[in-house]
Amino acid sequence: MTVKNQVRTIEISCVEVWREISNYLEGEISADLLARMQAHFEVCRHCAAVLDGTRNIVQLVGDGKVFPLPDGFSKRLYSKIRQQYP
Amino acid sequence: MARPRLDTVEAQLIRRVCSGDREAFEELVRPYERMVYLTAISVVGNPSDAEEVSQEAILKAYSNLRTFRAESKFSTWLVHITYNEARMKLRKARRHLYESLETPMSDSQGDYWPRDFADWRAIPSEVLEENEAARALQAAIQSLRPGYREVVILRDLQNLSTRDTAAALGLPEATVKTRLHRARLLLRDALAPGLDGCWRTGLGYRKVRPW
């Protein structure tokens, strides 16, 4: 890759990167944009931090420990169904 | 293309329920209890109301099961019923929120600017074991505007696809994507300081900033 091409690859603003971070995590961006964003993350620690933070959020929210079912939820639910539809 | 086996099992259960087998209904909905509860809490915001909504939604699904036409997945249909029940409860219980619930959300609020650039690259997988972190994450999700909260809970917590989320909430897929993006960034802003280490070290917010 030439120096000129490298410079062109990095040319994406932080605002554009933030706009696409969620799509980046979902893998829903074009190959060209992917390359430009990856190049940006290499040189911009702020955007790399936003990316890592957002990725962590997706993992933490998705790990199933938030909002546990209240104790006795199932028992109360099925008892109500049986009560209404004996 | 052959339908997956699970769908066949589900279809059989639905037929049994429609023939009057109530116990088959319990078998049918048991795998979706948590999904229904999470959908409810995404709208009403607190555990006791969410449980009440869950019960009402599941009872409604039982009494309306004959109207289910399998044009969508059973799970999507159930989420849709729950979502409607939850919104109805919110309208009844909190009239003062009626306007904000019904006012269409603007999904073009300009570009996002991070509140800070906290560097929390090391993924603290054990962090949620700590009650404080779990409470902070719950509070952060609950503090989101309803439109964001509903989408992030269905997509990231329940792992519904964009398509199923859009169908359940009656939104265009593009809106689901926009709201999910914004919700994730808002949650990052809200949680970054704590997950950066200050919950465990007791250090103040600024002390854990790397720059």
Image (cartoon, coloured by chain):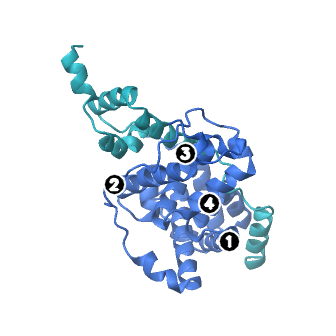
Q: Which one is earlier in the sequence, the residue at label 4 or at label 2?
A: 4
How crowded pointer 1 is (Cα within 10 Å; few <14, some 14-19, many 20+) is rated as many
Where is residue A51? Give x, y as percent: 45, 38
Q: Quadrant of the N terminus of chain B?
A: top left
Q: In this structure image, what is the colour of chain A?
A: cyan
Chain identifier of the residue bearing label 4 in the image: B
Residue B174 disc label: 2
Examine the rendered structure and indicate whether residue B90 appears above or below residue B194. below
Q: Chain B hue?
A: blue
| Residue carrying label 3 | A57
Q: What element carries label 2?
A: helix
Residue B97 lies, with reference to residue A33, above or below; the image says: below
Can residue B186 be spotted in the picture? yes
Whole-number angstrom distance, CA of label 4 to CA of label 1: 24 Å
Q: What residue type is labelled 4?
A: Ala
Binning the other alpha carbons within 10 Å of mark 4 as few (below 14), some (14 to 19) or many (20 upward) gives: some
* Closest to the observer, B44 or A36: A36
* Residue in front for this viewpoint, A49 or B25: A49
Residue at 51 percent of width and 66 percent of height: B80
Residue at the (38%, 63%) spot, across then down: B171
- The amino acid beneath tag 2 is Ala
